[in-house]
Amino acid sequence: MNIQKIVRTLILTSVSLLSITGCSEFFVRKANTQGAFNAADVVYDKDTYPAVVLGGGVGGMTASVYLAMANVKTLLVQGGMPGGLLTQSLSVRNWPGEIESTGMAISDKLLAQARKQGVEVKAEQATALDVTKWPYTITLSEVNEPSKTRTVKALSIIIAMGACSNYLSIPGEKEYWSKGVTNCAVCEGSLYKDKVVCVIGGGNSAVEEAHYLAGIARKVIVFVRGTALRATDRRKDELMSMSNVEIVYEHAVKKIVGANDKVTDVVVLNTATKEEKTYPMDGVFLAIGFTPNTAILKNVVALDADGYITLTNDQQTSVLGVYAVGDIVDPRYKQAVTAAGDGCRAALQAHTFLMQTGYKAPHEATTLPASPAAVVAHAEKGDDIETKSVVPVIEKEEHAYAPGVVHEMRSTQEITSLVSDSKKPVVIDFYATWCGPCRAFSPLYKKLAERYTGKVTFVKVNIDNLGGVATNYRVQGVPTFVFIKDGFERDRVVGGGSSERQFAEKVESLL
Ligand SMILES: Cc1cc2nc3c(=O)[nH]c(=O)nc-3n(C[C@H](O)[C@H](O)[C@H](O)COP(=O)(O)OP(=O)(O)OC[C@H]3O[C@@H](n4cnc5c(N)ncnc54)[C@H](O)[C@@H]3O)c2cc1C
C-alpha cells in the first residue's frame, strides 16, 4: 500500500468515528485541505459515477439538473415514487413561475429537464450505502424487481429520499387525500378561506398548522387525543386566545366522510366517555408527523433523534462528499421550493468537492440512439445512455392524431406533453390487457371518441407498459378514466360501470 492509500484509509476510518462522535465538521475542513480524496486514483468503469443522486423528488431532480449542467455525469435513482411527494398534490400554487399546476405536471417537467441535461435516470432504489471506502459503494435494486440488484461506485452522493407522512389509517383518509385531507397547511390552507377545518394532533406542528390556518379559515378545531397540547407555552397560549380556534381534548378522529370528491364531516370519538360525534368539516389537516426515509442510513451518516439527517455545513452530511437535501433533512418547512433550493446548494457543494479531488469531466464521444423516440424508449427501458458530449433532446410530439380515434400512448413523454400542451380536453383510459371490464368498456369509449372528434382527445395507457404514468396519476385499479382540461385533472371514473349517458356527461363538462 502506498503512502497516499494509507493516509486515505486512515482518514476514511476517521470519517466513521467522527460521524459517530459528531465532530465531523472539523474533519471535513481538515480532509479538504489534505487532499486525501484523489480522483486520479479512481478506476472508472461504466458503474462509476462522479455523482449519484438518491431520490427522484423535487430536491433530487433539481440537484441532478445542476450537476449535469456542470458537465458532471450524474445518475438519478428515482426510488418507488418517481416525482416524489409533490405528485400527490392536485393544486400547487406556490411553485415559482407557475400560477397553479398539479404537482405531477411540475415533477414531469423537472424530470424532462433533468433528462434533457443528460442525467441518467433509473427506476431503482438504494438498499445500502458503504461510505467506509471512497469511491463510495451504493447497492441498488430495481423498483419493479427488487431481487435484481447491482452496485455502483460514487465519488459524491446526494441523498434526497424524502420523508413519509404518518397516517391515521382511518376510513376516508386515503379516499379524500388531497381532496380535503392533507398534511400541509402552507400548501393547501388557502383553499379553505372562510371554511371550517380541523387539525389533528397535539404537538408543536399541530399548533403551528392551526396558527397558520386560523388566519385563513372561518373556524379551526384542533382535535387532541390527550389532555394537553405538547407545544411551547407561548405559542399554545396565543393559539388558545384566538377567537376562531377551538381545542377539543381527549378526542380522536375515527372517520372522514365525504361526497363528490370533497370532505363533508369527521366522526370523532370522545376517548373519555366513548361517545361519538359528527362535526361538519371542509378540510382535515393531519399534524401527526413524518418519518424520514433514513432506515438504510443508520450508521452511514449522522442522524438526529427523530431520524432526520443532520448537516454540518450547508448540505454537507457527516461524511465528506455526501450531501442531503429536502424533506429528509428538514423537520420544519417541508416545501418543494426549499427542497429545490437545497438541491441546488448540494449540487454546487458536490461539484466543489469533486474539483477538490482533482476530478475532471471526461469528454468521451457519445453514440446516441438516432431518433428522439428511440431516446425516449431507451430512457423508459432504463437503458444506460452516455450523455457526456451529446445531450439527448426529447423533442415535443406533434399530437397530430387522426380524428375520432383512441390513441395508444407509447411513452411517458408522449402523454406528459399531450396533457401539458393540448388545447383540447383529454380523456385517458388506464387499462390492462388482462382486464375484462376494460375490454367490455372499450367499444363505448371508441364510440365517444368518434362522437367528440375534434373537441376532445381520447387516449389510452396500458398500465403494464407505462406503470410510471399510472403511478403518477395515482391509478389504483383498471379501468380508470381521467378527465383533463388545461393540464389539470377535473374528474375521474374508476371502473367500467358507467352508462353511455353518464360518461358523456363527464366529457361534456370539459367543453
Ligand atoms: C399532499 C401534499 C401536498 C403538497 N403540496 C405542496 C405544495 O403545494 N407546495 C410545496 O411547496 N410543497 C408541497 N408539498 C410538500 C412537497 O411535496 C415536499 O416538501 C417535497 O416533495 C420534498 O421533496 P424531496 O425531494 O425532499 O422529497 P420527496 O418529494 O418526498 O421525494 C423523495 C424521493 O426519494 C425517493 N426514495 C425514497 N427512498 C428511496 C431509496 N431508498 N432509494 C432511492 N430513492 C428513494 C422517492 O421515490 C422519491 O422520489 C406537498 C406534500 C404533500 C404530501
Image: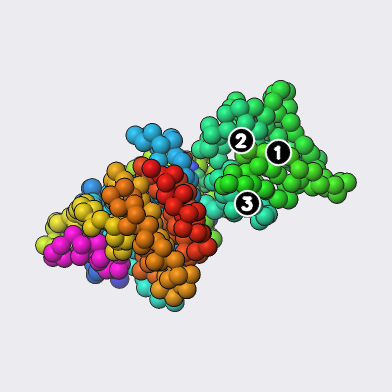
* Residue 223 picture location, percent across and down: 73, 40
Give neighbour class at mark 2: few <14, some 14-19, many 20+ (Cα, 10 Å): many
Q: Is 222 covered by the magenta stretch? A: no
Q: Amino acid at mark 1?
A: Pro
Which marked residue is nearer to the observer: mark 1 or mark 2? 1
Marks 1 and 3 close (CB-CB < 8 Å): no
Q: Residue at x 62, y 47 (%)?
A: 259
Magenta residues, as a range? 367-387
Q: Residue at x 44, y 75 (%)?
A: 434
Q: Residue at x 59, y 53 (%)?
A: 175
SS state under label 2: helix
Snapshot quadrant of residue 99: top left
Give neighbour class at mark 3: few <14, some 14-19, many 20+ (Cα, 10 Å): many
In the rendering, which numbered label is found on residue 209?
Answer: 2
Closer-to-camera residue (291/48): 291
Left or right of residue 257: residue 293: left
Q: Which residue is mark 1?
A: 280
Q: Which residue is mark 3?
A: 173
Which color scheme does this rendered protein use?
A: rainbow
Left or right of residue 177: residue 87: left
Q: CA distance from mark 2 to mark 3?
A: 18 Å
Quarter of the image with the C terminus is top left
Q: Amino acid at mark 3?
A: Glu
Kindly tell me whether residue 346 is visible in this rendering: no
Q: Which of pointers 1 and 3 lies earlier in the amino acid sequence?
A: 3
Task: Say if 164 sits above or below 284 in the image.
Answer: below
